[in-house]
């Protein structure tokens, strides 16, 4: 929603973005669809998200090869290739 509003208001070159969860969850990583939209419209953007080493800023292109599973209870999960395999 915020990204669409920013674009409709004329924003074209965003430097960074962060999503923050309710109930004290803090920064949350973007889902696959949001990653694709960010990559398509803002390929140079940095995303602020939680990592095992704390909150970090990463390039959107670094997030694209990995699928993410997200739940309201646990947020963005570590990449598990078995969830995305054909077999």
Image: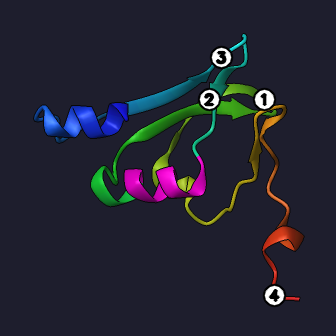
Locate residue 82 relative to residue 41 in the image: left or right. right
Circle nearer the viewer, 4 or 2: 4
Circle nearer the viewer, 1 or 4: 4
* x 28%, y 40%: residue: 4
Q: Are marks 3 and 1 in contact (CB under 8 Å)?
A: no
Instruction: Locate residue 86, reporting x and y percent.
Output: 81, 87
* x 78%, y 73%: residue: 84
Instruction: Locate residue 52, reporting x and y percent.
Output: 81, 33
Q: Are marks 2 and 1 in contact (CB under 8 Å)?
A: yes
Instruction: Locate residue 35, reporting x and y percent.
Output: 50, 53
Q: Residues within 10 Å of mark 1 (few under 14, many from 20)?
A: few
Residue furthest out toward the top = 24
Q: Is residue 17 magenta?
A: no
Q: Which residues are magenta?
A: 31-38
The mark found on residue 82 in the picture is none
Q: Are marks 4 and 2 in contact (CB under 8 Å)?
A: no
Q: Residues within 10 Å of mark 2 (few under 14, many from 20)?
A: few
- The image quadrant that residue 30 belongs to is top right
Marks 3 and 2 sit apart, C-alpha to C-alpha, by 19 Å
- The image quadrant that residue 55 belongs to is top right
Q: Are marks 4 and 3 in contact (CB under 8 Å)?
A: no
Q: Earlier in the sequence, mark 3 or mark 2?
A: 3
Marks 2 and 1 sit apart, C-alpha to C-alpha, by 8 Å
Mark 4 highlights which residue? 86
The mark found on residue 22 in the picture is 3
Near-viewer residue (56 or 68): 68
* x 79%, y 56%: residue: 79
Q: Earlier in the sequence, mark 1 or mark 4?
A: 1
Locate the C terminus and report the quarter of the image it occupies: bottom right
Mark 1 highlights which residue? 53
């Amino acid at each position: 929603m915020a990204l669409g509003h920013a674009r409709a208001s004329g924003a074209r070159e965003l430097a960074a973005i962060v999503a923050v969860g309710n109930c004290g969850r803090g920064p949350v990583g973007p889902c696959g669809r949001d990653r694709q939209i960010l990559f398509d419209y803002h390929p140079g953007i940095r995303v602020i998200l939680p990592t095992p080493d704390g909150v970090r800023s990463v390039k959107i292109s670094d997030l694209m090869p990995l699928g993410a599973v997200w739940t309201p209870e646990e947020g963005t999960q570590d990449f598990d290739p078995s969830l995305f395999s054909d077999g």
